[in-house]
Image (cartoon, grey):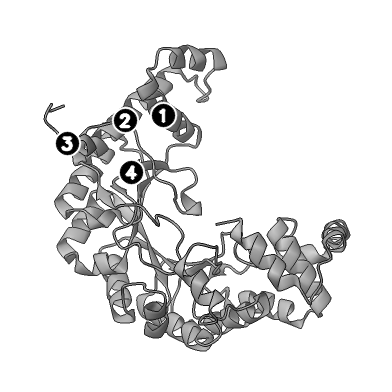
């Protein structure tokens, strides 16, 4: 290390950021940037009060090398079935410096998960210079040539500005999936929540990623338009996705924790949050408007009321609408029961309402805490804040 380097340029060991998509639960997390370069979205609680920075390329390479070294050792320790005895693990760990322990823990977790995918952190790794990202990707592939997927978050605004040639080169170097927070296709909603991008740019970025051969996940946030813009939010978001045809449409229902700009807009009455019933109606309109695409709708977050609102379009569309219609047809007491049971993790799909054991458990909880159709929305808001 150069002695006159700035403190922030010195390598302090393996780093990991605070978040990753649920679908990357088994991925190796490699931190390329710290925090978010935009960090102004009114609905997002992550990274507030933090400064964005790009990690030196040499530090990212050092992290990759550390994990690679530990993976090599783990493979040596493993038997024919990939198992390692606790005694051998403890013996290996005893010889590690404190500086090296985190990299080993990460390598072991990844080893145990099958070592098939890698996720680049933090919020927008594609914001770094393309040549630097391509070198990092190539180094990853040289160390872990068996990896099936390398993924990153990205902003539409960033992707839209990267040349098609650089995007293709990133794909050829191993970056084969990106996650983009579309959130909404409505310019009015995007402006209201300070997303920093418009619908046209969102569509442009999505199409560019697809042309480059990358798998594309677009995140949609039901409820983001509030009551005033709910219909426009549903229709314009579906229209944007119809133009993009992403591989995945991932639903993330809006929740409003304290301390974010949208919470202040809600307190002042400027933003009127949808309740669950209104949210279901909005989602139904959104799904109904999706047309001519083959995307996989995924509902893989506890914030979402329905886990079974998912499937590949167009074939799954009737089944998805049937789930939503079943909820809308329930009497208010059963709607309340499902809302509470889902957020408690007792129900995961509408069919769970047919389980007497699960119904009784949720009913007992509602009786204990005095929850009914008249106050369920307030309780749900409090429960959802705990999941963020």
| Residue lying at 21% horizontally and 49% vertically, measured from the top left | 133
For marks 3 and 4 on the same chain, the one whose residue lies earlier in the sequence: 3
| Residue lying at 56% horizontally and 67% vertically, measured from the top left | 255
1 and 2 marks in contact (CB < 8 Å): yes
| Residue lying at 45% horizontally and 63% vertically, measured from the top left | 44
For marks 4 and 2 on the same chain, the one whose residue lies earlier in the sequence: 2
| Residue under label 3 | 6
Secondary structure beneath disc 2?
loop
* Badge nearest the viewer, 3 or 2: 3
User: Does residue 96 appear in the picture of this structure?
Assistant: yes
Alpha-carbon span between mark 1 and mark 2: 8 Å
For marks 1 and 3 on the same chain, the one whose residue lies earlier in the sequence: 3
In the picture provided, is 229 more to the left or to the right than 200?
right
The quarter holding residue 285 reads bottom right
1 and 3 marks in contact (CB < 8 Å): no
Q: Residues within 10 Å of mark 4 (few under 14, many from 20)?
A: many
| Residue under label 4 | 31
* Badge nearest the viewer, 1 or 3: 3
For marks 3 and 2 on the same chain, the one whose residue lies earlier in the sequence: 3
Q: Residues within 10 Å of mark 1 (few under 14, many from 20)?
A: some
| Residue under label 1 | 102
Secondary structure beneath disc 4?
strand
| Residue under label 2 | 13
Residue 184 position in % (x across, y down): 43, 76
Secondary structure beneath disc 1?
helix
* Disc number for residue 280: none
């Amino acid at each position: 290390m150069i002695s006159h380097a700035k403190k922030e340029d010195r390598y302090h060991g393996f780093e990991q950021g605070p978040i990753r998509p649920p679908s990357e639960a088994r991925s190796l997390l490699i931190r390329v940037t710290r925090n978010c370069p935009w960090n102004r979205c009114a609905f997002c609680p992550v990274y507030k009060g933090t400064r964005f920075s790009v990690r030196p390329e040499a530090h990212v390479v050092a992290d990759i090398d550390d994990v690679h070294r530990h993976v090599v050792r783990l493979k040596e320790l493993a038997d024919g079935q990939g198992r390692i005895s606790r005694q051998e693990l403890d013996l290996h760990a005893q010889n590690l410096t404190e500086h090296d322990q985190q990299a080993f823990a990460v390598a072991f977790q990844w080893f145990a998960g099958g070592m098939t995918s890698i996720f680049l952190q933090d919020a927008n790794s594609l914001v770094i210079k393309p040549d630097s990202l391509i070198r990092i990707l190539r180094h990853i592939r040289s160390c872990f040539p068996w990896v099936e997927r390398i993924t990153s978050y990205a902003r539409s605004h960033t992707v839209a500005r990267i040349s098609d040639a650089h995007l293709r080169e990133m794909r050829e170097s191993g970056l084969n999936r990106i996650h983009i927070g579309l959130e909404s296709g409505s310019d009015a909603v995007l402006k209201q929540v300070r997303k920093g991008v418009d619908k046209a740019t969102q569509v442009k970025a999505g199409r560019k990623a697809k042309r480059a051969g990358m798998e594309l996940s677009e995140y949609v946030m039901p409820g983001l338009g509030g009551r005033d813009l709910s219909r426009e939010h549903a229709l314009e978001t579906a229209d944007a996705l119809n133009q993009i045809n992403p591989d995945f449409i991932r639903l993330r229902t809006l929740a409003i924790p304290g301390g974010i700009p949208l919470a202040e807009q809600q307190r002042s009455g400027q933003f009127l949050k949808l309740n669950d019933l209104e949210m279901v109606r909005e989602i139904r309109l959104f799904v109904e408007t999706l047309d001519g695409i083959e995307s996989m709708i995924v509902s893989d977050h506890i914030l979402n009321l329905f886990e079974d609102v998912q499937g590949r379009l167009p074939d799954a569309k009737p089944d998805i609408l049937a789930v939503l219609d079943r909820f809308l047809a329930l009497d208010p007491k059963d709607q309340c029961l499902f809302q509470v049971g889902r957020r408690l993790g007792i129900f995961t799909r509408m069919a769970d309402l047919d389980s007497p054991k699960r119904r009784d458990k949720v009913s007992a909880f509602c009786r204990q805490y005095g929850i009914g159709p008249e106050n369920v929305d307030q309780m749900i808001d409090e429960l959802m804040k705990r999941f963020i």
